[in-house]
Amino acid sequence: MKIQIIATTVLTTALGLTACNNTHNQDTQVATTESVVNTDNSKNSLDWAGYYFSPVPCTTCDGVITSIMLNENGTYEMTQERNGEEASVNKGTIEWSADGSSIVLNKQKYQVAENRLVRLDDDGNQIDDKSSHDHVLVKSELEQSPDINDGYHLYQYNDESGQSYNVIFNTAEVPPKVVIESTHKSTDADKIMYELPQVEAWAKGAVYANEDESVTLTSQRNTAVLSIAGKERKLNRVQ
């Protein structure tokens, strides 16, 4: 009788320990799964590879125009030009931060955001001044940055839905032209890329349109209206 009681006690204890171990393993598995789920960052969740450029010359850093090519193989090429001087080119390997949110290129830190790079200070903080747009590079499908000194003017606009557009005015040609491209394309249907000649101009604005006027851009100082097949999008220039 004693032997039977002892055996039953040992079996019950063993089953209890097994259940505790299973519960512990399940908790560990859940914690591990949650840890994996919460590891999304700029490096592994954004389409960061591509070409970036300064929409305008940097007014707080002697008019430097910066363009950067980030390659999928982890390398980069940075081109910087100041006041028409010969451009300097730096090539190297992209250094990612431990949390995958920022990179270091040529000893310069950038936050990697959707379709843009934001220059950071030496401590990894955003540069807080009145010319914040000086420190933002926008992503473009262009292969190289147009020469600002040859009559090109580059700006970024947002519409009411938050869609961003690179708008490049070329005043060097006759008639002047504008290139418009959307910078956020969730599907091919969202893709916009137009080159429109100027058809009308006045002191503070101009109209650009394709041949059948199915696509037009009316620009006036810091605002513009983009019309595609009769559907208008009001754009505001990013300051």
Image (cartoon, rainbow, N blue to C red):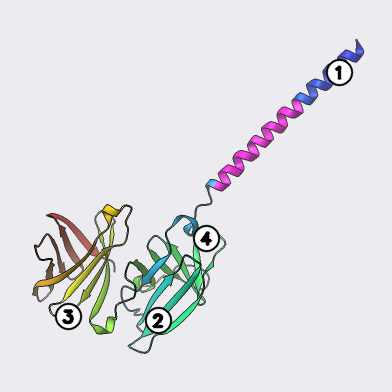
Which of the labelled discs sits on residue 80, or is there none? 2
Q: Tell me the SS state at disc 1.
A: helix
Q: Which residue in the structure is indicated by mark 4? A: 100
Q: Is residue 207 left or right of residue 30?
A: left
Amino acid on which disc 1 is placed: Ala
Q: What is the CA distance from the residue labelled 4 to the residue labelled 2? A: 25 Å
Determine if the magenta segment contains residue 135.
no
Query: Residue 200: x and y, percent?
Result: 8, 72
Q: Which residue in the structure is indicated by mark 1? A: 7
Q: In which quarter of the view is residue 49 placed?
A: bottom left
In the orientation shown, which residue stands out farthest toward the bottom?
Answer: 85
Query: Residue 75: x and y, percent?
Result: 50, 71
- Give yes or no for contact between labels 1 and 4 (Cβ–Cβ under 8 Å): no
Query: Residue 123: x and y, percent?
Result: 53, 70
Q: What is the CA distance from the residue labelled 2 to the residue labelled 1? A: 81 Å
- Give yes or no for contact between labels 4 and 2 (Cβ–Cβ under 8 Å): no
Q: Earlier in the sequence, mark 3 or mark 2?
A: 2
Q: Where are the magenta residues, as a range? A: 16-36
Q: Residue at x 24, y 72 (%)?
A: 168
Q: Which residue in the structure is indicated by mark 3? A: 173
Q: Earlier in the sequence, mark 1 or mark 3?
A: 1
Q: In which quarter of the view is residue 31 placed?
A: top right
- Majority secondary structure in the magenta region: helix
Q: Tell me the SS state at disc 4.
A: loop
Of circles 3 and 4, which is in front?
3
Determine if the magenta segment contains residue 21.
yes
Q: What is the CA distance from the residue labelled 3 to the residue labelled 2? A: 25 Å
